[in-house]
Image (cartoon, rainbow, N blue to C red):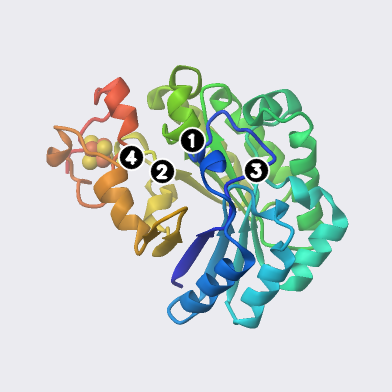
Amino acid sequence: MKRVDVKTNFNCNNQCRFCVQGNKRELYPPKTTKEVKEILRQSRRTHEAVVFTGGEVTIREDIIELVKFARLLDYRLIQIQSNGRMFCYEKFCDEIIAAGANQFSPALHGHIPALHDFLTRSKGSFLQTLTGIRNLKKRKQDVIVNCVVTKPNYRNLPDIARLLVHCKVNQYQFAFVHAGGRAGENFDAIVPRKSLAVPFIKKGLDIGIKAGIKVMAEAIPFCLMQGYEDYIAEKYIPSTKIYDAESVVDDFAQVRKNEGKAKGPLCKKCSCFNICEGPWKEYPQKFGWDEFVAIKE
Ligand code: SF4
């Protein structure tokens, strides 16, 4: 199903230390209701799935109206990508579900308040997001949780996985931090070595696999994911058009592969060269290519 991601606004009620959107919230005002509706109308000619994303879309006053409009246009999938905090309000959950949202992607980055709130720099965010996930599951919604892998949380990924299994989420994903925006500014404090994080990522995946939950890992190349190739997210990400702050990207996969990610000098010798996207380019710019060892046939 072809998907369009609409970045409706960059303001947010969290202040994540790793936010790849950086200071866009200061640079770009939210798109107007009219602008978003026009994007939805145009995109429906070619796309069947829409993801409302930002910034934080649930703090828009018109979010219910926009979801209703997407429903009216008969989008088959209407996903709300969110930090999950607003879902702690039961009335809001009921309203956005009734409006037509049918998939939710909240973000949880810790298993305890001290860790999650430290990363989001927003006291109380853990409790709100966790309550939000539970509220959505109580309403039998399709919940795909995103967890950004960072230096402060990578050792706790198995704990986070256990919590998400306990919440009975439909899917969770460990996305290795993309060192752009604030993550780039805070590189030393935020970006771990992949070789240190990967054993914890694999343990975290195992917990979901054993529980029968769909799990994924993003931005970890094949050479570090041997034995877990089926869980490499890039293999499954659908073709996505993105309406960003000022630009429109027709196929994000191409931008990701050609501009966002990189391959190293030895990658050409790797049997996965053609299917691997490599890491986000900022990572080897800082750490080099030692951890990425070409896979032999
Ligand atoms: S192409 Fe490079 S980054 Fe990708 S799996 Fe092979 S060695 Fe690793």
SS assignment at label 1: helix
| Image position of 294 (left or right of 19) | left
Q: Residues within 10 Å of mark 4 (few under 14, many from 20)?
A: many
Distance between the alpha carbons at the discs numbered 3 and 4: 30 Å
Pointer 4 residue: 221
Q: Are marks 3 and 2 in contact (CB under 8 Å)?
A: no
Q: Residues within 10 Å of mark 2 (few under 14, many from 20)?
A: some
Q: Quick check: is the Cβ at mark 1 less than 8 Å away from ligand 1? A: no
Callout 1 amino acid: Lys
Q: Residues within 10 Å of mark 1 (few under 14, many from 20)?
A: some
Q: Are marks 3 and 4 in contact (CB under 8 Å)?
A: no
Question: Residue 113: image x %, image y %?
Answer: 75, 28
Q: Quick check: is the Cβ at mark 4 less than 8 Å away from ligand 1? A: yes
Vertical position of residue 21 compared to residue 47: above or below: above
Residue depicted at 60% across the width and 40% down the height: 207
Vertical position of residue 41 compared to residue 210: above or below: below
Distance between the alpha carbons at the discs numbered 2 and 1: 8 Å
Vertical position of residue 32 compared to residue 233: above or below: below
Distance between the alpha carbons at the discs numbered 2 and 4: 11 Å
Identify the disc placed on residue 12: 3
Mark nearer the N terminus (1 vs 3):
3
Callout 2 amino acid: Tyr
Q: Are marks 2 and 1 in contact (CB under 8 Å)?
A: yes
